[in-house]
Amino acid sequence: MGNPLGVEGVITEKTIKRLAKQSIDFHCHGIGRFDFTDILSLKLQEIEDILVMRKQKVVLTLYLPQPSFESFLELMEIFEQGKKSGKFKQIIGFALEGPLLSSHGGTPEKGVWIPMKQHWKRLAACGKKGLIYVILSPDARCPGSHFYLNLNTQAPTITWITEILLSGGVLPAPGHFAKTDPAASAKELQSIFDVVAAWGQGVIITDHLFNDMPLNFKHAWRNKEEKAQRDQAVKQLNLESWHLGNLEEKLGHIPAVMIKNARKGLVKLCQNFDGEHVDLAIVKKAVELTGVENMLMMTDSIESKRLAGCDLTMREGSTLLYQNTGIVAAGTQGVEKQIQNMVTIGLSPQQIKFITNIVPTDIIAQHARLQKRGSLANELV
């Protein structure tokens, strides 16, 4: 990256707005009034119209309650037909968060369940309809997983799931890890990247780096009491000492595996730049370690402040949205604010363009290429 974080001069508000209009939000949970857990209520044309007005491009990231599985497949049919007729230009595609998540995190409980092989095959078939990625937990079978005592022998392995999703051009996006045995979780994570390497047709992505995974450090200071300790705590992290040779020691098993495989060209890491999911000092170091060519932006935002039919709340001094259990459900900061934060940590316009436009655009192009290749293969059979 050369001098990755140094930038001379001031980046103007006009430049920030231009970068925002060129960007793709690769992970967004709510546009306008819509609660993305309520699949039956989604009106794609209304969402598209909002995005057209804002000049925003977004991957709609849905939760998938088991009773809504067929409704989701029908939604994908509607999107495919609309896309073919030129209706949807701002809705880039769809993603799912879950349902195979070892740790709920902010995901509604009804969106977490164990899909069987027939479910995964049908989701893989949605690749040609616009499903770009599925967030899943590689360590679902490991101790500490939400599913550990419930997974039966009929449930498919993570390597089988990875292979079947990739066969449809749908990217497995690892995230939501258990925290009981990080080394075991990291081994399962690496098995996904081994499949991707053998597949040899492109890269996958991750859920947001540092969230919902075991770490060797504190990554965020969110309430008033924590923020009072933040500066001293960041100083004690000694971020200057973090380098590619000590990732496991400093960061932990999971982020180490992610960054190493990103540097190998197998995965692009999603990062939230709102400064509250992950402290910006840590984000700055993560960009330096990973490289802007290996990262993409996600807002994880919900505008309606509702999830799974329940109101989400905000806390004093924070822009995060919380469930009534006190768990962070999502953020509220849009693309412009995230880009402003990128400027704050010293990224240049070209580096910001990589994260917000070039990398996500390349992944969308890869998706289209895989679908075309799949269609040609089907014609030859």
Image (cartoon, rainbow, N blue to C red):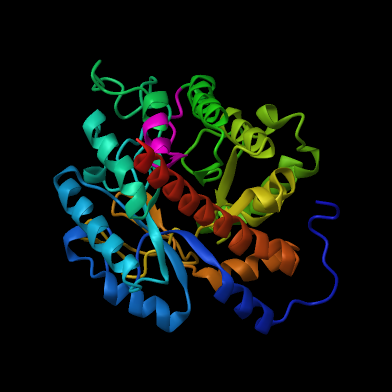
Q: Residue 211: in sight, yes or no?
A: yes
Question: Residue at 85% across / 70% down in the picture?
Answer: 8
Magenta span covers which residues? Answer: 163-180
Q: Quadrant of the C terminus?
A: top left
Tell me: 349 left or right of 163. Answer: right
Total marks shown come to 0
The quadrant in which residue 243 appears is: top right
Tell me: 196 left or right of 113. Answer: right
Indicate yes or no whether the magenta region holds residue 247.
Answer: no
Residue 370 vs 18, above or below: the answer is: above
Question: Residue at 25% across / 40% down in the picture?
Answer: 122
Q: Residue 219: in sight, yes or no?
A: no
In the image, 217 versus 365, the foreground residue is 365
The quadrant in which residue 351 appears is: bottom right
Question: Residue at 21% across / 46% down in the picture?
Answer: 65
The image position of residue 40, as x and y in percent, is 16, 61
In the image, 293 versus 4, the foreground residue is 293
The residue most toward the top is 153
